[in-house]
Structure formats: C-alpha cells, structure tokens
Image (cartoon, rainbow, N blue to C red):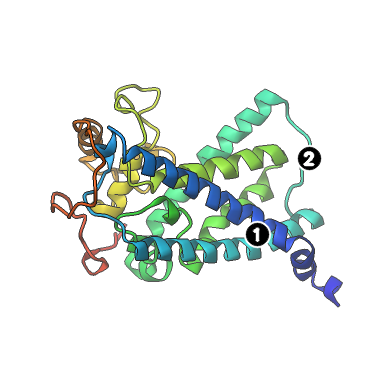
C-alpha cells in the first residue's frame, strides 16, 4: 500500500533525516549569526546596529515558528524532489566535473538563484499577490537572523521551487548542491541580521560593491519596501532601477558611526527612517 505512494514511502524512510538536516541548517545559521551579533553589540562596534528600533521577543518567536513551518513545506516538496530524482525526471549526478568545473557550476547556480529570487520576490510585492505570499515575511520590520525562513506557506513553496527547476535542467554534483544550500542560508541569515557585518570599504571597491550587504536588505524591510529585491547581488536592482537611492549613503552612515565604549542597551525609535512603520502603512509595488 505504502509502496503505491512513493512520496509517502520516502517520508517514512527519509523524512526525519531530511527535516533534521534542513531545519538544522537554519538553526545553525540563524543561531550563529545571532550569537555574533549579540557579541558585536557588546563591543566597540555596537553602533553598527542598523535600526534604532528593537525587535521584540514576540517578533523573534514569530520568525522562528514561521521558519519551522517553512521547514515543513520544504520537507513536503523534498519528498517529490527525491521521487523525481529516483524516477529520472530530475537529474541525479554523484560524480564531479573536476574542481574547476564544479566551482563554475556553483557560481552558475548562485547567479541563477539570485535572478530567480529577484523576480519572484518582486512579483510577490504586487498588490494582488502580496497579502497571500509575502505579507507574513514583512511583519519583520526590524528583522533578526531568525527571519531567514520566516515565510507564509505559499511563499515557502515559491522559494523551494527553484530546486526542482534547476535539477530538471542541470545535472549537479551532490557536493555542489550541498555547498550552495549552505551558502544560501548563511547569506540569508546575514541579510536579516539587523547589524552591518561587512567592512566599511565594501562599497568602495569593484571587487565587492556588487555583493549585497545587510544594510541593503534591511532597507527593504524598514524603509524601502518597493526597493532592494536582490538576494546575493545588487545587479538586478541596479539594472531594473529598484535599488534604494539612499543605499550607499545609509551603508556609509552605519559603518562610519563613532565606536562606543560600553554596551548599548535598548533604545527607542528616533524616527530618522520609516523604522516604526506598521504594515498598515506598507504600499506594495505595482511593478
């Protein structure tokens, strides 16, 4: 009976391991990033906290529970991905293209995923889609690393859909896929850290200025709702004219703040940015 339903058989055989691996990645990435931010906020770099507003315990609890929900969606879709690989619909590749070939493929999947993320993210900001797909994530006006997978169920399906699409077209070595999914969650946690983790020269050199910073995505949550849709890079935002016009200024302001000598306690919103906006004031893009 169970064998007649391959996804159910896969769930019983591999489901716990798949869930533990995926949710474990989230816990490690969000937990380590949170610990780093906690330590830095008690150092001379404490002024690099991007927003004056503080995320509440309720915010963090909601982000965690929504991320747990996302891990459940990812488990469900993963059952069909495994089934697709077993039946040959999706590519299975246990070998290697050589170190250079594998590294080139890793770069390709990162670039492709960034493009996918930009366009589906921007689409989910459309007024007809926003409430169903993306509003839950934007409840984090002041995001924390725990918001990395804080999605509504429909958005979680959209986010993981990239994996079967990629595997349908490209035979990817297992270890390359492993590197990418871990790179993805680390960068996601960093983007929601609420604390600028990149050095002050990041935007001053062509070698790094096209790579997203924490400030870039934080602006999307706190004051540039219809801006800064990119995940890893700023390319698409620049090409499509959706980068926040004050992004570079904000970044330099954050990384140039005077060092502090004592730990900084909770502070009240100063109203400098739209950091205290509620979702009632959010106007989704019509692009």
Find the residue positioned furthest to the front: 262
Which circle, 2 or 1, is nearer the viewer?
1
Q: Is residue 47 above or below residue 80?
A: above
Label 2 crowding class (10 Å Cα cut-off): few <14, some 14-19, many 20+? few
Q: Which residue is mark 1?
A: 19
Left or right placement of residue 133 versus residue 113 in this view: left
Q: Which SS class for mark 2? A: loop
Q: Is residue 92 above or below residue 57?
A: above
Q: Which SS class for mark 1? A: helix
Q: Where residue 265 sits in the image (x, y, percent)?
A: 24, 48
Find the residue positioned furthest to the bottom: 1
Q: Which residue is mark 2?
A: 94
Left or right placement of residue 175 versus residue 226 in this view: right
Find the residue positioned furthest to the left: 271
Q: Where residue 220 sits in the image (x, y, percent)?
A: 30, 51
Write the residue at 61% across / 54% down.
22
Q: Foreground: 76 or 237?
A: 76
Q: Where residue 271 sits in the image (x, y, percent)?
A: 13, 53
- Determine the image quadrant of residue 236: top left
Q: Which quadrant, please, contains the N terminus?
A: bottom right
Write the residue at 46% across / 46% down.
188
> Residue 167, labelled with which disc?
none
Q: Foreground: 268 or 142?
A: 268
The answer to whether any part of residue 128 appears in the image is yes
- Determine the image quadrant of residue 195: top left
The answer to whether any part of residue 230 appears in the image is no
Q: Which quadrant, please, contains the C terminus?
A: bottom left
- Mark count: 2
């Amino acid at each position: 009976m169970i064998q007649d339903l391959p996804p159910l058989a896969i769930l019983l055989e591999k489901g716990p391991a798949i869930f533990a691996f995926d949710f474990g990645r989230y816990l490690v990435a969000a937990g380590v990033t949170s610990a780093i931010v906690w330590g830095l906020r008690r150092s001379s770099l404490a002024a690099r906290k991007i927003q004056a507003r503080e995320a509440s315990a309720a915010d963090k609890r909601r982000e965690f529970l929504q991320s747990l929900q996302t891990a459940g969606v990812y488990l469900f879709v993963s059952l069909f991905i495994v089934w697709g690989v077993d039946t040959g619909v999706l590519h299975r590749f246990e070998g290697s293209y050589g170190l250079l070939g594998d590294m080139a493929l890793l770069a390709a999947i990162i670039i492709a995923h960034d493009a996918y993320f930009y366009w589906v993210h921007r689409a989910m900001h459309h007024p007809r889609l926003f409430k169903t797909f993306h509003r839950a994530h934007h409840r984090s006006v002041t995001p924390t690393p725990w918001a990395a997978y804080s999605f509504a169920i429909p958005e979680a399906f959209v986010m993981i859909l990239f994996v079967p699409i990629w595997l349908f077209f490209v035979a990817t070595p297992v270890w390359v896929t492993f590197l990418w999914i871990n790179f993805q969650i680390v960068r996601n946690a960093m983007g929601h850290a609420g604390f600028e983790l990149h050095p002050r020269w990041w935007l001053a050199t062509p070698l790094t200025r096209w790579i997203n910073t924490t400030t870039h995505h934080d602006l999307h949550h706190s004051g540039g709702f219809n801006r800064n849709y990119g995940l890893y890079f700023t390319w698409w935002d620049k090409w499509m004219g959706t980068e926040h016009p004050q992004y570079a200024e904000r970044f330099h302001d954050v990384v140039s703040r005077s060092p502090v000598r004592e730990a900084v306690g909770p502070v009240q919103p100063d109203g400098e940015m739209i950091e205290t906006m509620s979702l009632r004031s959010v106007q989704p893009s019509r692009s």
